[in-house]
Image (spheres, rainbow, N blue to C red):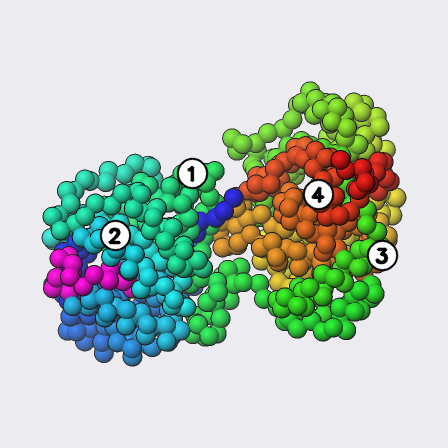
């Protein structure tokens, strides 16, 4: 699945007074118009309470309202815009003004209090009837302004307006004119829709009423207006062509399509559009009778196509001191840290890689540098070291287990922001398997050849210790020889809480009921700062360590996981690896280390915090670092084909991996988070992956007893 972004914003039409006479505009007025400071602060306060992240400031060009500004004590209009932006920053909102063409000096002043700015190019055709009487709509004037913004290092949004009398060639030339600017973060492809005039009315009020009605009821009565004579038709094929041409010319730039001006926007997302703009809670002030859909409405429309994800008005690559004023960057770091790309202190030294290759423990600073490293030649050195360490510890054999997942219930009280699986008891998606369903699933697993049942569920508010024991006993009654790999440390902590027993006592009862080993999940990142940010209700690091230690001390082995690629920093990952290695050196109870890259698409953490799925390259680099961080303490490192896909998991066999996990049969947790790599593989799929990597394969048991070998020479 891919993602499509949007900004959670509110629109402030600070002044609609405008010097231009564009024939398609219903926003501008040529009478004095200015919102008062009290109105501005009320709008910003209300938006901040609703969690809005962006203040979109719209104005006419060079509004002639100086008498009103004099009464308010502002020397010019830009000073008033700066004041409004300062009020937004104080409340944790990021300003994005679109004021039309202003001077270089005004751009400098605005840069100090804005996260990004915008100006539509609209068209490179200088002779459009729609632009007559609007000198600043001359394409060269606007291109010069866009270029000046680039010289000042201002993250910028621009775009074209189609349907205003231009030709197909005009459209393509307009896109070509915008290509090549390194400060343009997104291009808007906007289709013209005709409006009535709003004499004596306030478009902002019409827009707000329309948006509130649409978000509340899902009903929108968008009026039909005949196009003026100077307009030209725009079809969905035209828009798809524009999306494709923009992608060709500007492959690294966001492509925004308005979701309120035509019903074809889901098809444009399928064609490659990446952004839906600002889903403004108070509507579209330029097209006030055309409300934006709400984030929930967008999610429903895009189901199966793309996952909507929040972004800030400034794109991640521009969140640096080079591009943002200190005051703006401070707000992002304080309020929206999850949107900042994960960075750390890179600079891995050759002696660090050599020490890691020998299995020696690394300092936190050395580990942080490895996770943050970006130089291809150094990453290749780390890959080779990890692969050599793998060969020494695990040999060339690639192992896998034939197993089945059974998630007995998805009812959960914890509310982890990274989870797409757990739901409340009252959710229409809530389920709990019956005993008959559970038994049928075990019979299916045995028929498939499974030797392991991996069993985890949500934290069910009605389950006590006896319920957990009951599922184990039922599984053993159904299949006495099956290995039960069950119950995360979070589930065990819940059993302790409801029973009043210690972890040792709980594990004793679980083992007597048939438990064979413990999944070392619920680890996420073993740093309490991260855990507080992504799941404040989850057990703290010390409790996780206590429960896993208890399992090991009574003779139960466990796996250990890490969930990476979300909001964690390289330093926090280094701390996770320190905790894991220290625990293994003390107990020796871990059978394997399982890196799990975060799937953001259908999770609250992914939707609201702007998190992109980690790239294949970063995933593989992290895999190598995990192997080197463990040294010789845990011989087996697994690649999760569910998270990264079988092709990437196969490639990971060159990055320190020796195990491809299980066949699974019924993987639910990653699937519900939006993973699209399947829920089941056959043993032949995993054998084939190993052989494509030039390595022999073997089916193993949960505890790494080899059951069946598949040598390379056996391949037909």
Badge 2 or badge 4: first in the primary sequence: 2
Q: Residue at x 63, y 71 (%)?
A: 345
Q: Residue at x 79, y 69 (%)?
A: 354
Residue 392, disc: 3
Badge 3 or badge 1: first in the primary sequence: 1
Q: Is residue 682 left or right of residue 326?
A: right
- Looking at the image, how many numbered discs can be counted on the residues? 4
The boundaries of the magenta stretch are: 119-134
Residue 86, image x, y percentages: 36, 70
Q: Which residue is mark 4?
A: 689
Compute the Cα span from label 2 to label 3.
62 Å
Secondary element under disc 2, as helix, strand or loop, is helix
Q: Quarter-wise, where is residue 646 in the image?
A: top right
Q: Is residue 562 visible?
A: yes
Query: What secondary structure is the stretch in magenta mostly built from?
Result: loop
| Of the pair 649 and 302, the residue shown nearer to us | 649
Q: Quarter-wise, where is residue 349 in the image?
A: bottom right
Residue 300, disc: 1
Secondary element under disc 1, as helix, strand or loop, is helix
Answer few, some or many: residues within 10 Å of disc 1's Cα (few below 14, many 20 plus, some between 14 and 19). Answer: few
Residue 157, image x, y percentages: 35, 62
The reply to whether the magenta stretch includes residue 410 is no
Compute the Cα span from label 1 to label 2.
33 Å
Residue 21, disc: none
Residue 523, image x, y percentages: 70, 51
Compute the Cα span from label 4 to label 1.
36 Å
Badge 2 or badge 3: first in the primary sequence: 2
Residue 168, disc: 2
Compute the Cα span from label 2 to label 4.
48 Å
Hey, which residue is sitting farthest front in the picture? 716
């Amino acid at each position: 699945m891919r993602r499509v972004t949007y900004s959670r914003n509110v629109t402030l039409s600070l002044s609609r007074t405008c010097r231009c006479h564009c024939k398609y505009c219903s926003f501008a007025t040529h009478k004095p118009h200015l919102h008062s400071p009290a109105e501005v602060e009320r709008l910003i306060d209300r938006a901040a309470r609703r969690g809005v992240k962006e203040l979109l400031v719209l104005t006419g060009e060079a509004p002639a309202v100086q008498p009103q500004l004099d009464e308010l004590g502002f020397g010019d209009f830009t000073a008033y815009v700066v004041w409004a932006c300062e009020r937004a920053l104080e409340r944790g909102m990021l300003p994005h003004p679109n004021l039309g063409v202003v001077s270089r000096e005004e751009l400098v002043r605005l840069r100090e209090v804005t996260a990004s700015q915008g100006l539509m190019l609209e068209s490179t055709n200088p002779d459009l009837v729609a632009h007559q009487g609007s000198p600043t709509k001359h394409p060269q004037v606007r291109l010069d302004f866009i270029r000046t913004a680039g010289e000042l290092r201002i993250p910028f949004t621009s775009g074209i307006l189609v349907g205003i009398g231009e030709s197909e060639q005009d459209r393509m030339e307009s896109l070509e004119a915008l290509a090549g600017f390194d400060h343009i973060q997104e291009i808007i492809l906007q289709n013209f829709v005709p409006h009535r005039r709003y004499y004596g009315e306030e478009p902002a009020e019409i827009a707000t009423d329309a948006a509130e009605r649409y978000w509340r009821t899902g009903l929108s009565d968008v009026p039909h207006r005949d196009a003026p004579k100077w307009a030209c038709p725009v079809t969905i094929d035209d828009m798809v062509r524009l999306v494709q041409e923009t992608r060709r010319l500007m492959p690294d730039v966001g492509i925004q399509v308005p979701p309120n001006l035509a019903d074809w926007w889901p098809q444009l997302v399928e064609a490659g559009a990446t952004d839906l703009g600002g889903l403004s809670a108070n509507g579209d002030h330029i097209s006030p009778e055309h409300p934006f859909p709400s984030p929930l409405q967008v999610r429903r429309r895009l189901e199966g196509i793309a996952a909507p994800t929040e972004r800030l008005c400034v794109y991640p690559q521009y969140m640096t001191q080079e591009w943002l004023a200190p005051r703006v960057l401070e707000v992002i770091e304080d309020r929206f840290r999850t949107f900042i790309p994960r960075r750390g202190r890179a600079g891995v030294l050759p002696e660090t890689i050599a020490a890691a290759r020998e299995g020696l423990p690394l300092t936190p600073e050395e580990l942080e540098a490895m996770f943050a490293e970006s130089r291809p030649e150094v990453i290749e050195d780390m890959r080779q070291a990890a692969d050599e360490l793998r060969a020494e510890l695990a040999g060339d054999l690639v192992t896998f287990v034939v197993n089945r997942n059974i998630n007995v219930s998805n009812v959960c009280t914890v509310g982890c922001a990274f989870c797409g699986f757990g739901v409340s008891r009252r959710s229409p998606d809530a389920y709990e398997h019956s005993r008959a369903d559970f038994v049928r699933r075990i019979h299916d697993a045995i028929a498939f050849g499974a030797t392991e049942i991996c069993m985890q569920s949500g934290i069910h508010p009605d389950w006590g210790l006896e319920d957990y024991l009951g599922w184990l006993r039922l599984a053993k009654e159904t299949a006495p020889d099956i290995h039960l790999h069950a119950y995360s440390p979070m589930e065990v902590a819940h059993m302790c809480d409801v029973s009043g027993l210690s972890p040792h006592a709980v594990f004793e009862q679980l083992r007597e009921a048939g438990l064979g080993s413990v999944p070392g999940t619920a680890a996420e990142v073993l740093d309490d700062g991260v855990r507080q940010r992504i799941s404040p209700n989850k057990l703290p690091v010390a409790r996780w360590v206590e429960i896993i230690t208890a399992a090991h001390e009574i003779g139960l082995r466990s796996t250990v996981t890490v969930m990476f690629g979300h909001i964690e920093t390289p330093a926090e990952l280094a701390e996770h690896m320190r905790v894991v290695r220290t625990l293994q050196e003390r107990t020796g109870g871990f059978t394997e280390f399982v890196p799990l890259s975060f799937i953001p698409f259908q999770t609250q953490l992914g939707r609201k915090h702007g998190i992109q799925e980690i790239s294949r390259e970063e995933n593989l680099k992290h895999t190598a670092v995990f192997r080197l961080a463990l040294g010789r303490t845990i011989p087996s490192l697994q690649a999760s084909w569910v998270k990264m896909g079988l092709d990437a998991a196969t490639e990971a066999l060159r990055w320190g991996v020796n195990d491809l996990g299980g066949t699974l049969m019924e993987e639910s947790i990653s699937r519900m988070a939006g993973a699209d790599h399947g829920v089941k593989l056959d043993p032949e799929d995993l054998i084939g992956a190993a052989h494509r990597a030039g390595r022999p394969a073997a089916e193993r048991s949960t505890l790494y007893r080899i059951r069946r070998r598949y040598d390379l020479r056996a391949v037909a």
